[in-house]
Every structure is written in C-alpha cells, then in structure tokens.
Image (cartoon, grey):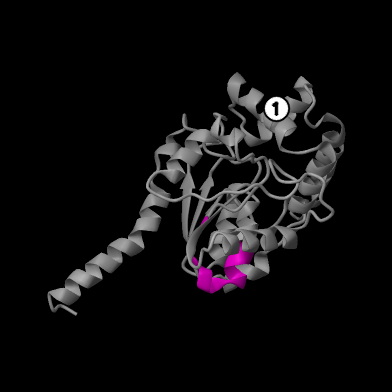
Amino acid sequence: MKAANWLNHLEYDWESPVWRAFLERLARGNTLIRYDARGNGLSDWDVPDVSFNAWVSDLKALVDDAGLDRFALLGVSQGCAVSIAFAERYPERVSHLILYGGFALGARKRSPESRAKRDAMATLMRFGWGADEPVFRQMFTSQFMPDATKEQADVWNELQRRTTSPECAVRYFETVGDLDVRDLLPRVQARTLVMHVRGDLIAPLESGREVAAGIRDARFVAMEGRSHLVQESEPAFEREEIRLFLSSDALNLLCFERARRCGRI
C-alpha cells in the first residue's frame, strides 16, 4: 500500500514521465495499491477537512475496504508522516514500513527562515497555481526537481492543474508545513527502511536521518541525486533497496525452514 501524497493523480501518474517509471518499478513483482488523497487528484477537491488526522483516517478506511490485514506500507514525501502515524496506531497491520524522501517535522516549524519562505510560497500559490506562468512554474519545479528537463518541467506544471485547485493546494501545503510526528517515531514497531536523496531541496537529508534515528533499528540509505522523487535518469533509480527489503523476511523464513528440516535448529 502506498500512502497518498501531494501531486498524485491515479490516472495521469501512469502517463507522467515523473511518476511512471517509479510506479512501474514498485509494481514489478508486487501488488501495488494507490489512492488519491482528499482534495487531490481524482478525489473530491471540495472537502471541509484537509488535515493530518483526516489523511491517516483515510488510509485506514482504504486498507479496511481493500481487506488488507497485514501489509507493507510505503510513504513518499509527506506520505511518510501519514505512514508513521498509521504504523504507530496499528502496529499489528504493518509488516514493513518504507519511507522515502520524508520528514518528521514540517518546514514551517524547522526555523524562522524556513517558515517565512513557506508562507511566501503559499501566497504565491494562491495566484499562480495551475497558471501557465513560467516564473512561478520555474520556482516551484526547481524545488522538486532542480535538474528537470523541459518535458519534466512541463509535467509538473500540468500536475498543478490536474491535481487540485489553488485554494486546496494552499490548504494542503500549509498542513504539510505544520506536521510534527517526532514523538511517534520511538513507538513504531514495524521493520523500517528509510531512503533519502542527498541533494533533496524539499526535505533535507538531515530530515531523513532524523526519522531513521528515531525509529528503533531502522535502516537508513542515502542516495545520490537532487530530485525529491528520484528519476529514471539518475543513478539512484537503479538501487534495489525496496525489493531487497521486502524479500529479506521471506528469505530468512526460507533459511529457517531449511535449517529446521535439516535438524540444525
């Protein structure tokens, strides 16, 4: 199960050069379940409650409806905080927790300078979101993907238009900026893999380190790159960390069973 995050669209993501390769790789050899967050993508944009608790409740409703008793949970960006909260509340349901490009503390709470920048961005979003304005598009895209090609930059611009309204985008942006799940980290029981790109401008590398340090026995993997979502053209895309992490339990169980049959245990 992939927890929803900002700038997702269940249909358009499969066409998008930004998301397509990432999703195809996740789905290879696995059943991948996705959904659009409230106020985002194909979900209703006109919603009264855009809040962190609502996002966690939505994830719970989705896994219940899908009949998932125990599953691997993937969080990307702010979806990591949602996944952390879910894993802490329902430890019996999460077999593996995979956190990519995430953070425990939202940008508005990291420093006065970060808060000021975030507030300024929110103001610009109210007027520039989804509009074909090169200045706004470049400012926004350069945060998520500093080395974007023209095609990738155009996709980010199209994602703005397709995924949500300007007002809902700002509400989402402000909620994400105020996230704080640091107190939940020590209570997470699931086996956890934390992955982070070294040059991420949205969530600095130290944000990923903080998450990994707070979760007992979490494995931290730092990857080369600068895009918030690693792209197919980057060396980090070829890393097999998620596949190896998910398969490790199955391999350990197989080794245990073979040892038992041979009388070694």
Residue 175 relative to residue 93: left or right = right
**Residue 12 rendering spot, x and y as whole percentages:** 61, 33
Closer to us: 244 or 13: 13
Q: Find out whether residue 225 is within the magenta segment.
A: no
Q: Quadrant of residue 226?
A: top right
| Residue 89 vertical position relative to residue 13 in the rendered view, above or below | below
Closer to us: 128 or 37: 37
Q: Which residue is mark 1?
A: 157
Q: How many marks?
A: 1
Neighbourhood count class around disc 1 (C-alpha, 10 Å): few under 14, some 14–19, many 20 upward: many
Q: What range is drawn magenta here?
A: 84-98
Residue 33 relative to residue 139: left or right = left
Q: Quadrant of the C terminus?
A: bottom left
**Which residue is at a point 71% across and 46% down the rendered structure image?**
43
**Residue 171 rendering spot, x and y as whole percentages:** 82, 47
**Residue 154 rendering spot, x and y as whole percentages:** 65, 23
Q: Amino acid at mark 1?
A: Asn
Residue 117 relative to residue 143: left or right = right
Q: Residue furthest left?
A: 262
Q: Find out whether residue 97 is within the magenta segment.
A: yes
Q: Main secondary structure of the magenta part?
A: helix
Closer to us: 241 or 251: 251
**Which residue is at a point 63% across and 53% down the rendered structure image?**
79
Closer to us: 248 or 66: 66
In terms of secondary structure, where does tag 1 sit?
helix
**Residue 232 rendering spot, x and y as whole percentages:** 47, 32
| Residue 148 vertical position relative to residue 225 in the rendered view, above or below | above
Q: Quadrant of residue 227?
A: top right
**Which residue is at a point 58% across and 27% down the rendered structure image?**
147
Residue 179 visible in the snapshot: yes
Residue 191 visible in the snapshot: no
